[in-house]
Amino acid sequence: GPIFPNGGVAQAGPITCERPGEGYLQPTQFDNHNAELLGYILTGAPKLQGFVMMPFSDKTDPSPEGRFSKRMDDSSQSVKPGNYSVRAENWAMGTGSTASKDCSYVRFEYQRGGRVCVLLDAQVADSAWWMKKNRPATKVVAANSSILDGVFEGMVEAEVNGKREKLFAKIQFMPKPVKVREMAANGRAGKRYILEFNLEPVVGNIVAKAATSDVSMDEAKARFASDGEVIDYSKVSGACMKAWDAYLGLEKTELKGKERKEFYTKRFHDRVKELLVK
């Protein structure tokens, strides 16, 4: 997932899940292109826990089981320094993520307009699997997690291989949801919410701006405020890609074609790893 090259602290990476909608029970995965749900996990890199945001449609959308089968359309996938986007292959949802220095931004675009929902799962630590730890994390979520007027504030705590870490987050959704419902925690300590949006009468986007901290909620709020009040996904994405172009351009090469691409790809990955370690 995108992270800002000059000291970025938040990262929203794409994930998938086997079942969309309110029947979502399965754990998230990181590279399952046949999965039925595509969303993002917000982490404070390289933390072992995070906050999952997954979009899904109303049950009136056609599929054999009353739900969409929303497999990723690989041909639509765009992976660039500073911006990631992909569409579902057989319905009208597109997703994207980018980052500023202090915040992550996630965008869900529903081309049909109308009712669309986002599942906010504040109890997930499945990134421990992705980071190839020896066993899954134990999740604990603070009781003061809450969502009001489309703004979520909360904390998750995970323990992996005896190490316990916390991650605080503030997430704002625009436009504001018309309805928020809390779901059962699915047998785990935590909070799960369904945010309902009405994008009628025009096609629209849902954008989530998020900031994290492994220190305190106050630090997460300060990082959130540092980006200002206006939420402009396109502007942030453009600035992030421009920053990456400047960073990658600091090191020149005479290589051409495939070798040139591999050279800058490695430089990009090396920088992301540096940020994750920090």
Image (cartoon, rainbow, N blue to C red):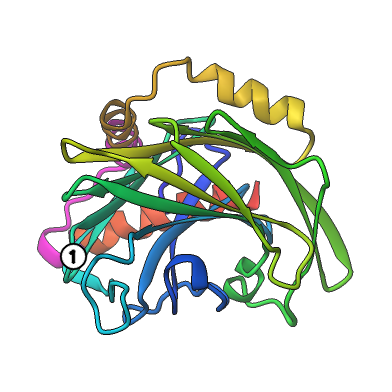
Q: Which residue is mark 1?
A: 91
Identify the magenta region.
242-260
Tag 1: Cα neighbours inside 10 Å, few (<14), some, or many (≥20)? some
Q: Is residue 29 above or below residue 80?
A: below
Q: Position of residue 20 (x, y in %)?
A: 42, 70
Using the image, determine if residue 148 lies above or below residue 47. above
| Outermost residue, left side | 257
- The percent coordinates of residue 138 (x first, y second) are 80, 70
Q: Residue at x 26, y 64 (%)?
A: 262
Image quarter of the N terminus: bottom left
Q: Is 156 in the magenta?
A: no
Q: Amino acid at mark 1?
A: Trp
Name the element at disc 1. loop
**Residue 85 x/y as whole percent:** 27, 53
Q: Give how far across and how far down residue 154 sits, in percent.
A: 71, 41
Residue found at the far front of this picture: 60
Comparing 179 with 212, the one in front is 179
Question: Is 40 displayed left or right of 207 in the figure?
Answer: right
Look at the image and say whether residue 259 sits in the magenta stretch: yes
At 85% from the left edge and 59% from the top edge, which residue is drawn? Answer: 164
Residue 67 vs 92, above or below: the answer is: below
The residue that appears at 20% across and 71% down in the rendered structure is 74
The answer to whether 61 appears left or right of 167 in the picture is left
- In this image, 208 relative to 215: left or right? left
